[in-house]
Structures are given as structure tokens and as C-alpha cells.
Amino acid sequence: MAASSQMQAKMRRLFRTLWTQIAYVVPAILILVAGFVFAYQFVRPAPPDRIVMATGNKEGAYFAFGQAYAERFRKEGFELDLSQTAGSVDNLRLLTDEAAEVPVAFMQGGIGTPADYPALESLGSLYFEPIWVFVRGSAAPGRLTGLVGKRIAVGSAGSGTRAVALPLLKDNGVTGETSELVEIDGSEAIDALRAGAVDAAIFVGGAASRTIGTLLAMPGVSPMSFERADAYVRRYGYLSKVVLPMGTLDLTKNLPGQDLVLLAPTATIVVTPEMHPALVDLMLLTMRDTHRQGGYLEAPGAFPTGNHVTYPLAPAARRFYERGPPFLQRYLPFSAANLIDRLWVMILPLLTLLYPLMKILPPVYSWRMRARVNRWYKELEALDDRLNDGSIGRAEAAAQLDDIERSVEKVHVPPGFADRAYTLRMHIDYLRRKVDGRGAEKAPPVAAD
């Protein structure tokens, strides 16, 4: 029974100690929570789990690269839904149609202008997309003026091929009045060229694409090498002059059969203001990892780049090309880096509130524990004064001491302040002896602060 009582008393003391500490910790926690709630108002919204990206037709490079992008996004926990389109012009329409909810798209350089679409921004260019002109016959002309009077496949409506081909043809006197312009592209244009349904066909695509490889190997069809490439570059800022050396695509078959001087816009990524900043960062990382190895016309590391773009670079893209990825994204998985980047403002209340609370709480806690004991010294001092001036009898003083002692026995302080509680009881006993007529004994020492 005695052991059980001791255990119960010990548990009660432990519970009272914990409760006393909690009473001081909980207000501090509530203050911190209030600070976090306030700071959360300034946290950027989380990125959406799904976005739509406009690509191109299923046979084209845009859709193929879009699939690689979608896989990278999937690994990071996001769904990149690919929208097949007719091409860059169609993509531009989707970007500017709010009902379409398409915040990002592949876009061929030279499509649209910043003046007409001021809200659009570029994330950079990815690779060169040469303009290929294939003509039936053993030798293609070196100038577009040689296509006057011919049947020419210029790309389907909504395609980037048609958008870039028509101005170049017009500058060379090739229009609907002087020639027959046929709005087909892709496999349909290849079949028409093979069958002789058209005399020439214009394509825009990477040097390594299957379409270009098929055309270069097609009997009776020759690629054009632009004699006046430098003049076009001066006239059209979105075009670059590139050279594909003889045999680059196939050394055994010697494809192409001669050095080809080509005009090339670049493939770019264009976004709207609705593109979430975190997904902009992920898109830039995906662009870098997908295209930095280069190709037949691009040196390793030359792409992606902030050059050769039609629309102004987004601020995040400019920082990316100037300084590289954000600090956290260099060392952490994207999801973790994005979470920290979003919640960094939450650290401010932690630093702003926690430090002063850590400084204030211990002294306040110590003061409160001492106050539980020290308040009874006022009662003892008043009773001692009344004994000295004879204003209270011994019996009444003894009764008051009994009341004080019973109250003090209920006072609980943590073990670190127990010496004050026991010192108080020694002073109560000292005063009791004084009341009983034994006041000559030496007073007990006072607990040090």
C-alpha cells in the first residue's frame, strides 16, 4: 500500500510538472501558428496537377518531343496532356484562346509578332528547323524564283510550314497567281511529290527527322541549296543560315549528296501568363535535358538558348540562361525544391517569432515559478511584524501559520525550484517557533536567486 501511494504521488507530481510546462508552451505554439497562418496568405498557389501543351501532328517532331516532355513531367508528378494540332499557327490560336486553356506550346520561330500578342513569352529555342524545298528533277534551282509556274505543296492551313513559306515565295514572285499553291504537308505532300501530283514541296523540320530522310533518299527528287541565304537572314530576323555537309545523314548512301545551305527558324517554347511559375521551371529543366546534346546542325550545349526567339524571354527563362537552374533545383529533386521554394516565406515567422520566444519564455517561466513561492513571504513578513508590535496574539498567529502552511503544501513547483519551496517551509517553521516562544533560534538561510 505504501509503495502504491508513493507511486501515485510521484505520478501526480510528474503530471503537475508536465501540465505547468504545457501551460507555457501552448501559448508560444499558438503564436507561431498564428504567424504561419498569416504568412500562408503570401505563399504561391501550388501548381496544377495537369496542363495541356499544344504540339503538332502525330507525324511531326513537336509531338515526338512532346511525348518525351510528358514522360519527364510524369516522373515529377504532373500530367502533361499533349494536344495534336495542325502546327504552329494552330498552336498560336490555342494559346490566345482563353477557352482552350492551353498555357504552353511548341512554336516555330517567326510565327506571329510580339506587337500582336504582347502577353506571350518565350522560354527559349530548342533546335534549328530548316526550310527544305524538294523539287522533282535531277537538280533543284538555287533560288525560289525557279518555282514560278510550278505546283508547290506549301503546307496545310494552320501549319508553321505554310506560315513561313508563303512570305518567302511571295518575295520571289511565287504567288497563287503565278503558280499553283497546294495546301498539303506531311505524308500527303511526300506522296504527291513521289506521284508527280506536285512539282515541288516545302517542309520545315529537323535534319534528323524521318520525313527529311525519306525525301533525300527519294529517286527523281532534289533538295534546294539556297544561294542567297545571307540575304534572307538580313531580311528576316528569325532565320539563320545553316549548312548540312554532304553525307551527314547517311555516309553509305551519301545523303545529302552535296553540301546544303539552308534557311532555318528555330523550334521554340511559348507560354501564356497562365503558365504556373513552378511548371515554367520544370519546363526549362526538361528543355535543357532533352536538347542539350545537340544534333546535326546544333553543337552540344548550344541549345536550348535564349537566342533566335520571336517573343521576349520570360524572366525565369532569362535567369535560367544567365545563371543556370535555381539553387535548390541544382541539388534537390524538383518536387522538393519546388515545395521549399513555395514555402520559404513560412520560415520568416519561425525565425521572427521563435527566437524572441526562446529568449522570453525561460525568464518568464522562472519568474512565475519563483512567484508561486515568494508570494507567501509577504504573508509571513506581515505576520512577523504584527508579532513584533504585539498587535496579534500567539493563538491567532498560530492559526494563521496553520492556514499558510496548508496553502503552501498545495503549492507545486518543478524540481528545479524545489529548494525555494523547502526554504519557505523552513521559514514557516522558524516563525512557528517564534510564536511558541522559541524565537531565539537562528533563522534559516534564504534561497538564492
Image (tube, rainbow, N blue to C red):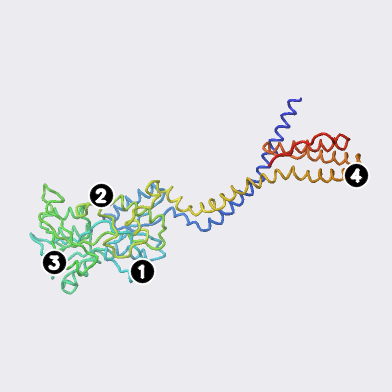
Q: Nearer the viewer, residue 246 or 216?
A: 246
Q: Residue at x 87, y 43 (%)?
A: 388
How many angstroms separate mark 4 from mark 3 (CA)? 123 Å
The mark that comes first in sequence, 1 or 3, is 1
Q: Which residue does the numbered mark 1 point to in the structure image?
A: 118
The mark that comes first in sequence, 4 or 3, is 3
Helix, strand or loop status at disc 2: loop
Helix, strand or loop status at disc 4: loop
Q: Nearer the viewer, residue 10 or 146?
A: 10
How many angstroms separate mark 2 from mark 4 (CA)? 102 Å
Residues marked 4 and 3 touching at CB (< 8 Å): no
The mark that comes first in sequence, 2 or 3, is 3
Residue 360 appears left or right of 157: right
The amino acid at mark 2 is Gln
Residue 228's label in the rendered image is: 3
Q: Which residue does the numbered mark 4 point to in the structure image?
A: 390
The amino acid at mark 3 is Arg
Q: Which residue does the numbered mark 2 point to in the structure image?
A: 293
Find residue 230 and report its image quarter.
bottom left
> Mark 2, residues whose alpha carbon is within 10 Å: few (<14), some, or many (≥20)?
some
Residues marked 2 and 3 touching at CB (< 8 Å): no
How many angstroms separate mark 1 from mark 2 (CA)? 32 Å
> Mark 1, residues whose alpha carbon is within 10 Å: few (<14), some, or many (≥20)?
few
The amino acid at mark 4 is Gly
User: Which quadrant holds the N terminus?
Assistant: top right
96 versus 177 height, above or below? above
